Image (spheres, grey):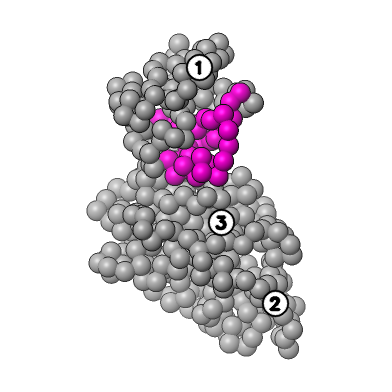
Amino acid sequence: MEDVARVVLALEQPEVAEEVMHFLDRTGRSRVVGTASDPRQLAEAVRQLEPDTVVAAPSLLAPRGELNGSALLALDTTQSVATLRRAIRAGAAGFYLWPAEREELAIAAARPRPLPEQDVERPARVIAVYGARGGAGTTFLATHLAAAFARRERECVLVDLDVVFADATVALGVPAEEPVRTIGDLLPLGEEVGPRHVGEVLWRHPLGFGTLLAPGDGSAAVAVRGEHYRAAIAAARRTCDVIVLHVPRALDDVARTGLELADRVVMVLGLDVLSFRDAKRAIATAALEGRCAFVVNRVSRSEIVPRDVERVFGHAPLAVLPAVRGVSAAQDRGRLLPLRGRLGRSIDRLARLLMEEPA
């Protein structure tokens, strides 16, 4: 029975729980070793039985509950925004409808337990989004690029390196009344940060990507250094497909660390002389020559046109994003724009191109 996944089942409806248990046992690839009908029973079953997989109703899940390394799959008979969000906040690896998606559930439940942290290695790509001039649209592009990767079913982690202002926190709509964890919670671990530690502090956006938030203010903002981000990013890239770094304009220790770790730096430009000049200076100062892809943001009528990017920097822009109404208002309300229309297609294409580039 060594190849059979051990499952703990936590569902509120007894008749559904019985159906799921018999179905999983019949597959021969998994075996239900325990059941629970409330959060307390679930926590106790996980502690005692140490299952490979937990299959649970979203209503029984606590945000980032202790699973002792077990994989978490959410299961329900209906689907709603509320249940999806609850599953995301709990860290579920998948959401399945019963009985329509029972075959998919069986496959996911039977997957073996992940290898220990030191043996897990995923070739995550690190993409830094940087604007040398203030107001270029770095926060907008970084957050929407993370959403585009998630939409393409890539496991994405957005890392906010803006330790002082933490603009991504506002742009993503992180609830002010909700206690959230930031990179400041990882400082006591020093260089011992592992994938599990990073996963525990990520804030999950409803669109499907995780975010390592910046502290914004307080003592943690003063204490965070580039070495802390270096350890966190090294751990995170072992558990996902792509990491998007939101890099602040000031080329301080933290920003330079992010730019150094990036496989690709997306330089956000405006169609004006100051934006071009500042980008040239940043490329020289941070030694970014040959590592930049250029994105022109908020394109409108101007004496400077997108094709001037190739004349000045030697490379045509990888994406040209049109100016659209409502961007500032959406960010002020903590909302991401729907990835549709010309703007959405441009960001989606940019995500595809960045992932298709040779490593």
Rounded to the nearest angstrom, the CA distance separating label 2 from label 1 is 58 Å
Q: What residue would you read off at disc 1?
A: 15
Magenta stretch holds residue 89: yes
Q: Earlier in the sequence, mark 3 or mark 1?
A: 1
Q: Rounded to the nearest whole Å, what is the CA distance between mark 3 and mark 1?
A: 40 Å
Instruction: Report the quarter where the N terminus lies.
Output: top left
Q: Position of residue 310 (x, y in %)?
A: 71, 76
| First of labels 3, 2 by sequence position | 3
Q: Which residues are magenta?
A: 70-99
Residue carrying label 3 = 146
| Mark 3: few/some/many CA within 10 Å (<14, 14-19, 20+) | many
Give, as a three-letter code, the residue at label 2: Val
Pick the front one: 259 or 66: 66
Q: Residue at x 33, y 25 (%)?
A: 41
Pick the residue in front: 284 or 335: 335
Q: Say which amino acid is labelled 3.
A: Ala
Q: Mark 2 against mark 1, which lies toward the viewer?
A: 1
Circle 1 packing at 10 Å, graded few (<14), some (14-19), many (20+), is: few
**Residue at figure coordinates x 43%, y 77% from the top left:** 250
Q: Amino acid at mark 1?
A: Glu
Q: Secondary structure at mark 1?
A: helix
State left or right for residue 271 relative to residue 259.
Answer: right
Q: At numbered mark 2, what does the secondary structure look like: helix, strand or loop?
A: strand
Image: 168 above or below 39: below
Q: Is residue 78 above or below residue 37?
A: below
Image quarter of residue 54: top left
Say which residue label 2 marks. 299
As rendered, which of 358 and 243 lies closer to the eye?
243
Q: Earlier in the sequence, mark 2 or mark 1?
A: 1
Query: Residue at coordinates 40% horizontally, 45% vertically from top-left?
Result: 199
